[in-house]
Amino acid sequence: KKKVAVLDFVNAGPYERLDYLKYLLPQILISSLVGQEGISVLKRHRLQPLLGEETLAEEGFLKDKPFTPEEADIIVEGSWAEQPKPGLSFEETPIMIKVIVRGVRSRKILGEVKVQGKKQEFARIQKELIAGILSAISGKKSAGKEAKEVVSSWEAAEYLGRGISIMQ
């Protein structure tokens, strides 16, 4: 099984009003990846040592990159940004979500997924993200079970995201 770590997302846009997506988007991806054939998702509480050691290695303090015993083979990292246009309301403002899937040891990018849509298209956005990530992990055009939506609407995502943010 490939061990996958999903990192917190980064706000690449000018507005802070969607900062709860930092934790919500990874949680959606984790929920979708669990149960996929050939994938083992690294538990969130085990990511901090992994990330800390990777940072030390990148800064030259570690020659070899030692990781936790439950080492990730694949990292999923991403960002989002609102794409404001004059005259559009908050609900009509498109959001762009970008995800990079890369091998840990090789640092090779296995795939990039970009999905854009309005907030009312959140179900479609998450299905496309999940399908693209599964494809990158497997190396196949269509992989695993059909991507399912985890959160049914933007409103539900907003409530969940704010709750997860408070718990962090």
Image: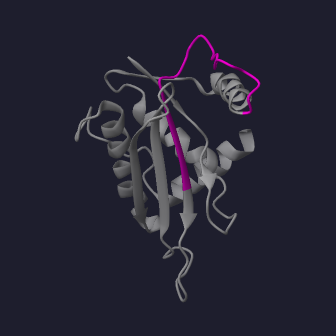
* Near-viewer residue (16 or 67): 67
Residue 148 appears in the rendering: no
Query: Where is residue 146 drawn, in percent x and y?
Result: 26, 39
Residue at point 67% right, 68% down? 15
Extreme residue in the bottom direction: 87
Answer whether residue 97 is magenta in the image.
Answer: no
Q: State the quadrant of the C terminus.
A: top right
Q: Which residues are magenta?
A: 59-79
Q: Residue at x 30, y 31 (%)?
A: 138
Name the residue located 58 percent from the left edge and 56 percent from the top edge.
158
- Is residue 129 something that shows in the picture? yes
Side of 17 relative to 4 (left or right): right
Q: Main secondary structure of the magenta part?
A: loop
**x 44%, y 39%: residue:** 101
Q: Is residue 101 left or right of residue 50?
A: left
> Quadrant of residue 153 in the image?
bottom left
Q: Quadrant of residue 115?
A: bottom left
Counting from the top left corner in percent of width and height, residue 21 is at 60, 52
Please say if 90 is above or below 99. below
